[in-house]
Image (cartoon, grey):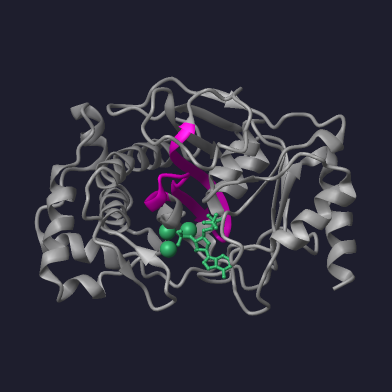
């Protein structure tokens, strides 16, 4: 077995199973949406997916830590919500029993489920094996039927070694280019659902996101950009999450004439890694917000393994080893390696004029 192949298999199957749960939630009327302290939404889908994924990690790698976005405190005294999540968690299985076996058996009780969710409480850092988990990235996109991603990465001594992104609303077809509609999708339509994955030093892949075991994967590569003015650039939907103004000034200076593709979640990283788009810009709106490691770890590795470069707005690699946030970085600039320095120069120029 090659390095990290067991970790990748568990991560891919766990993410795949969690997407079955999130898709079920999307079709339910009552999504159990709560507003967190920072006013961002969380649903029964976020909690349920976090429980299922942490259970699989702990069964297979009991000594590993997890930095997960969600925590169970709001559920411990809200029994209605807790029971709604339990029904989902109990009822979600891959249709292939061999793959279920690899994940390590079901969660047995409600308390075990709450404890699994809370096991995502690692402080992070640059020592040992730590998983970064975003059970639903782009919760707002998920709620409105746009893009979202189930994101899982393994860091070893602060370096991302394995990354997996489950994107139920992206096309299976790697060659389908992004369009203005890509971020506003027809959920669950034919031909949708892709699982991106990478192991450090071994390249990046995609495969259809099925309901059983893992389907055949194929390597993915970023698209060579010979004319930067024709590049497709992606950005967040929410103007509060990245600066649409700065990003549009940068695109303009690069001579890009096409409108940006706005989509929620790390689907942006997956899309540029497979060459459906080219550049992902995420420039800070606020001076104090620190990006969370679970919003970037898997995407960072997948893009780099597909031939891209990912830095912050100063040109530094993202440092995942300083805790739960990217405290040492500001913003994200992701592009094919051959044009990254050109893009970065313009990013610096635009930001220096502020
Ligand atoms: N102020 C601010 N600045 C930057 N980023 C923030 C901010 N607030 C929240 N978040 C995080 O944004 C995550 C979603 O990012 P997206 O790129 O998907 O944004 S968007 O939904 O397209 O607008 C989102 O991830 P999820 O909570 O998993 O959806 C948040 O972690
Ligand atoms: Mg959130
Ligand atoms: Mg997120
Ligand atoms: Mg999330």
How far across and down, in percent of the image, does residue 160 sit? 56, 52
- Quarter of the view holding residue 249: bottom right
Which sits in the foreground, 203 or 327?
327
Relative height, residue 131 to residue 169 (above, below)? below
Q: Number of labelled discs?
A: 0
Which sits in the foreground, 303 or 74?
74
Was residue 153 drawn as part of the magenta stretch in this picture? yes
From where the camera sits, is residue 200 visible? Answer: no
Which sits in the foreground, 277 or 219?
277
In the displayed structure, does residue 344 sit left or right of residue 7?
right
How far across and down, in percent of the image, does residue 47 sit? 28, 59
- Quarter of the view holding residue 242: bottom right
In the displayed structure, does residue 23 sit left or right of residue 134?
left
- Quarter of the view holding residue 35: bottom left
Which residue does the image show at 50% across and 42% down from the upper left? 184
Q: Read off the magenta span.
A: 142-170
How far across and down, in percent of the image, does residue 14 sit? 33, 42
Quadrant in the picture for the C terminus: bottom right
In the displayed structure, does residue 276 sit left or right of residue 339?
left
Quadrant in the picture for the N terminus: top left
Is the stretch drawn in magenta largely helix, strand or loop? strand
From where the camera sits, is residue 3 visible? Answer: yes
Relative height, residue 5 to residue 319 (above, below)? above
Which sits in the foreground, 219 or 345?
345
Was residue 97 drawn as part of the magenta stretch in this picture? no
In the displayed structure, does residue 300 sit left or right of residue 147?
right
How far across and down, in percent of the image, does residue 32 sit? 24, 61
């Amino acid at each position: 077995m090659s390095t990290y192949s067991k970790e990748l298999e568990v991560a891919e199957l766990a993410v795949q199973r969690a997407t079955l749960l999130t898709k079920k939630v999307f079709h339910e009327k009552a999504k159990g949406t709560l507003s967190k302290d920072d006013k961002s939404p969380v649903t029964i889908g976020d909690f349920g997916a976090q429980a299922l994924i942490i259970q699989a990690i702990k069964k297979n790698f009991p000594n590993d830590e997890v930095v997960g976005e969600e925590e169970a405190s709001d559920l411990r005294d809200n029994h209605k919500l807790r029971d709604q999540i339990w029904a989902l968690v109990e009822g979600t299985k891959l249709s292939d029993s061999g793959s279920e076996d690899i994940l390590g058996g079901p969660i047995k009780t409600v308390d075990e489920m709450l404890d699994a969710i809370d096991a995502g409480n690692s402080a992070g850092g640059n020592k040992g094996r730590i998983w970064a988990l975003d059970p639903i990235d782009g919760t707002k996109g998920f709620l409105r039927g746009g893009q979202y991603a189930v994101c899982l990465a393994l860091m070893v001594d602060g370096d991302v070694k394995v990354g997996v992104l489950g994107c139920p609303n992206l096309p299976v077809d790697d060659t389908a280019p992004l369009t203005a509609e890509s971020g506003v999708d027809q959920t669950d339509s034919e031909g949708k659902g892709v699982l991106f994955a990478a192991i450090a030093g071994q390249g990046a892949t995609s495969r259809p996101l099925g309901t059983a075991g893992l389907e055949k994967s194929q390597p993915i590569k970023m698209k060579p950009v010979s004319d930067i003015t024709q590049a497709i650039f992606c950005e967040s939907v929410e103007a509060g999450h990245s600066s649409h103004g700065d990003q549009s000034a940068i695109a303009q200076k690069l001579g890009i004439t096409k409108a940006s593709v706005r989509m929620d979640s790390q689907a942006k990283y997956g899309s540029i890694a497979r060459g459906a788009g080219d550049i992902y810009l995420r420039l800070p709106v606020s001076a104090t917000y620190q990006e969370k490691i679970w919003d970037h770890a898997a995407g960072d590795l997948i893009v780099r393994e597909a031939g891209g470069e990912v830095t912050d707005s100063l040109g530094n690699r993202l440092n995942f080893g300083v805790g739960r946030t990217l405290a040492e970085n500001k913003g994200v600039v992701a592009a094919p390696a051959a044009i990254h320095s050109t893009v970065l120069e313009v990013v610096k120029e635009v930001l220096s004029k502020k």
